[in-house]
Amino acid sequence: MRSAIRGGIRAVLLAFVLWSAGSQGLKLAAEAQRETSASVPVAFLNVNVVPMDTERILERQTVVVRDGRIADLGPADSVEIPADAERIEAEGCYLMPALADLHTHFVYGPNCEHDLFLFVANGVTTVRDMWGMSPFLTWRAAIRRGAVLGPTLYLASTGMDGPGGYWSALTPPIAWPDEARQAVASYKAAGYDFIKVYSDLRPEVYAAIVEEAAAQGIKVVGHVPTRVGLLDVLAAQQYSIEHFTGIVELVSSNRALTGVVDEERLREVAGLVQEAGVWVSPTLTVSTVSLDQVAGLAQRPEMRYASPQMKTWFQHPTNQAPNRDLSRPVANSKLMLKGLNDAGVKLLLGVDSGIRYVLPGFSIHDELRLRVEAGLTPYEVIRMGTVNAAEFLNRQEETGSVAVGKRADLILLQGNPLEDVANIDKRVGVMAGGRWLSETWLRERLEQIAQSYGN
């Protein structure tokens, strides 16, 4: 009981510290937005559209955006352009839906709003944070009302775990079903979008979480608790499974990514996941970092934009990567992703940013590349971060594709992303909720962030 109380106190104190820092950051971000805001229609002229409804390109289109929505789309000579529209000459460019990173972790401190901007600067306009705290709820509201420039946020609750869990300092341990039910009700009342479960829950506690979440009308996402196992999690219809938890234990010789994967068993397990209709959010990038790489990763150009708080977080012992040969984990991660995809499992794009030098926004490009290297097509991979994300969030009518009436979250690219996902890192600009942000402006803002950190 005393350890539970201490864990709860630590969580409350940490939340208060983060709240104080986060509140200061909101004001700074709001001021920055006012300097660059615009409310006029925008017309993309002669652009190649990547609609993502099927694997196709609509050549030489004009797309008109008004009031944050796609108001018109059609062949370049058939669309009427509003007289007051800002015209963007986009011949030879490609317009695609912006991406959703549905497995992230935020770090807070002075100037913490800059980490949110890193997503937008890389064409990620929707984010699901997987370990919520009270400051995140304020950020979500501020972004939605336009006071802060950042991605649309969806928030999972603080991870629910048993006594002695890996992150026990960040969440009160839950040992009994009644405690679980109370916590679920509390998180729902606070406004979280999902309930997050972690690895060390007892079966009866997990069952209570699932039952109460169903009663409260909120979905359960997260790890497969070790003592529960994949089959029971599938039976419980957990909405999403993060990483390969629960799956790798059934298909690897040592129950980890360092073992030998039984490909026949993988096909069987993937079939069970597909049949259950449970979403999976693999995170390949975070599994491909070894301790001996950290010095090199710290020197990557984009690390100039990592906040001091994030760099401190990277360096925390619980976040340090093991020192290991990565060849087997990387190969197994790709093998498992391919197996799940081939079986028709519903897959999401998620990176686990904020962990092990995985930088928000920039790391999405590593994840895209790794998934294509696993044998998936660019269209399949991009679909995970667009159409699939919209379905997962129940926002199919709002986002995920380029179509009239959809929210104008878009990326304008120099090259065709269906030919090479690396083209997603060759932007002309990003549109977030109808607000056009040219690549020049984005780079200037990034440079200001780097200079504010003394880089």
Image (cartoon, grey):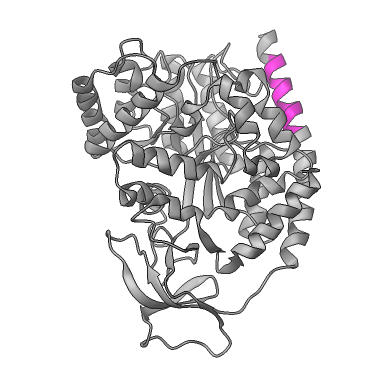
Question: Can I make out residue 349 in this image?
Answer: no
Main SS, magenta region, reads helix
Above or below 398: residue 245: above
Question: Can I make out residue 180 in this image?
Answer: yes
Left or right of 291 on screen, residue 324: left
Residue 358, by quadrant, is top right
Left or right of 374 on screen, residue 312: right
Above or below 186: residue 247: above
Q: Could you say which is closer to the camera, residue 6 or residue 336?
A: 336
Residue 435 covered by magenta stretch: no
Q: Residue at left 61%, top 23%? A: 319
Image quarter of the C terminus: top right
Spot occupied by residue 427 in the image (x, y as percentages of width and height): 52, 60
Q: Could you say which is closer to the camera, residue 302 or residue 101?
A: 302
Span shown in magenta: 5-16
Q: Residue at left 48%, top 40%? A: 366
Residue 14 covered by magenta stretch: yes
Left or right of 401 on screen, residue 147: right
Q: Residue at left 42%, top 66%? A: 94
Residue 104, by quadrant, is top right
Image quarter of the N terminus: top right
